[in-house]
Each structure stands twice: as C-alpha cells, then as structure tokens.
Image (spheres, rainbow, N blue to C red):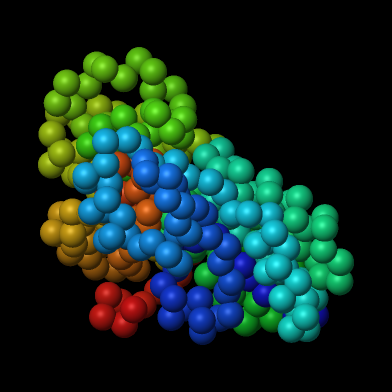
Amino acid sequence: MKIAVMTDSTSYIPQSILKKHHIRTVPLSITLENGENYKENETIFADEFFSILEQSETIPTTSQPAIGEMIRAYEAYRDEGYTDVIVVHLSSGISGAYQTAIQAADMVEGINVFPFDSKIACLPEGAFALRAIELIEAGKEVQEILADLEAMRENTGAYLVVDDLKNLHKSGRITGAQAWIGNLLKMKPVLTFEDGLIVPYEKVRTKKRALKLIEDKAIELANQYEDPTIMIIGGDNKEESHRVYQEMIERCPDKNVVFSEFGPVISSHLGLGSLGIGVTDRHIDFPAEDEK
C-alpha cells in the first residue's frame, strides 16, 4: 500500500510543504469583471488579486476545479505507483469541489480515491492534509487515517471578521444573514462555520472589538484541547493580521500558533479587510514565516 494526499488550492499550504510531501493541488478559478479567467495560485496570486479587488466595481466569480484536472491528478498518482489517495477539499457547503472529486473518482481505475469534506476552508482545511501526511509517515492504514480526520473535524472550527457582508451575500456563500443585510450601519460582522456553512455569529460595533472577540473565542476553543493548533489567517491588511498573530503568540505561549493568508478565491467571497482564526485539536507542524 502506498498512500498519497491531494487537496485543492484553497487549503493555502505553502509550496515548500506541497513539494516536500508530494501533495498535488487542483486549482479553483476566478473570473474578473473583464471576463479574464485565472487559476488560483497558478496564474494569479493573493497580493496581485488584492490590488484588482480594490479597484473592481463588481465581485469576481469563482468556480470549482475542472473534473479533468482531478482525473489527471489521480492518474498521475496511480502511474507513480500509489494505490490510494486521500483528497481533502474545502467545505461542500460553499463549493462543489468535493462533489466533483467524487465524480472524478468514479472515472479512474487502478487507484482507490477517498474524497474528504473538510467542512471548512483555508489553512484549517490544509491542516487535514498535513495531518494525513503525518499519519501516513507513522504507518497508518487508509481507514485509520480517515477515522482520525473525521474525529479531528468534530474539533475544528474558525471565526471570521469581515468589513461587510456584500461579497458573501452576492456570492451566496453565507447562510442565515438576510436579517443583517442593510442593517449593519458601522457594525462589523463576526462569522463562523456551522456544519460546513458560513453563518453569522455576532455583530460588533468596531473592528477592534471584533478582532478581540474572535481571539477570545479561538482561545476558549483551544483551551478545550491538550495540544491544539491556532491558525491566524490574514488578508490584505498585513499590519493588522501580523499584529493579531503576535498578540495570539503572547496570549498563548504554550500553544502552537501559526500564520497563513487568504488566497484569491476565498478573498473574493470575504472581501477586503477580512481576517480569520481557525483552531484544531491536533498539533500541526507548519513552517515559521521566515521558513516559507
């Protein structure tokens, strides 16, 4: 038995780690208001996209990975001698990537494909792929790994602060927020994931209070676990996200606090000025900022 791990571009795992562990990614795509189409982290990257988003009058649209790309990735693993591949995807509640992975699996012979719905996105999604690698290296069987990932999923969560709900509302990626739309004034929405869906959590008067709230909630969640990982996920406001990262390191000196960033696809839904904090109950090895 030889097991591979695969994911999609919204896991935002650094290229150095992808290469080291032979993790293939299939890209989601973005279409801009001028009709130009790009593949995330292949033909468009975060900083360039932030500049485009700042000047754009419309919200870019996104699309799931092409089924043909998934099939080719599965076949490539098969041709390299892999017998099984665990495929970690962003939540099926906000993307069709997981369902496409299932369809593609039925079209490939000679390798066992196990799509896994992370029910989350960004580095918390990527954490499942990294955990799977750790278990493969420990000699675990596929079913043992999947069982571990399912248990981990029950103890993984995230909180988000966005400047407004415009992008999420228009892209249809938020549930239960209709009562908030047009009634926020200067309030800052705090969101969370609930059964794979992005849902409203609380409205806070200022960005500063909203950030403090998600820090507190992440610490509260992390304190339930013996060896958790806290994931700070920054956006276009680099100064703000790095400040939150340093604050969390200071507030949680005994915990594994790591830093990541939103890529173009998730940024297109959250909009500018967004920041997230994810928590999982597993210790996830992740490079420091100067090692990426």
Left-right relation of 270 to 63 = left
Residue in the image at 47% along x and 45% along y: 62
Is residue 199 visible in the rendered image? The answer is no
- The C terminus lies in which quarter of the figure? bottom left
Residue in the image at 72% along x and 76% along y: 77
Observer-nearest of 252 and 170: 170
Left-right relation of 41 to 277 = right
Left-right relation of 74 to 274 = right
Position in image of residue 174 (x %, y %): 43, 31
- Would you identify the image quadrant in which residue 59 lies? top left
Report the residue that reaches farthest toward the right: 109
Position in image of residue 121 (x %, y %): 47, 51
Residue 3 to residue 26: above or below: below
Left-right relation of 121 to 253 = right
Residue 90 to residue 209: above or below: below
Residue in the image at 51% along x and 84% along y: 20
Residue 247 to residue 272: above or below: below
Is residue 26 visible in the rendered image? The answer is yes
- Would you identify the image quadrant in which residue 270 lies? top left
- The N terminus lies in which quarter of the figure? bottom right
Residue in the image at 63% along x and 54% along y: 66
Observer-nearest of 125 and 167: 167
Number of numbered markers: 0
Position in image of residue 24 (x %, y %): 59, 71
Position in image of residue 54 (x %, y %): 22, 46
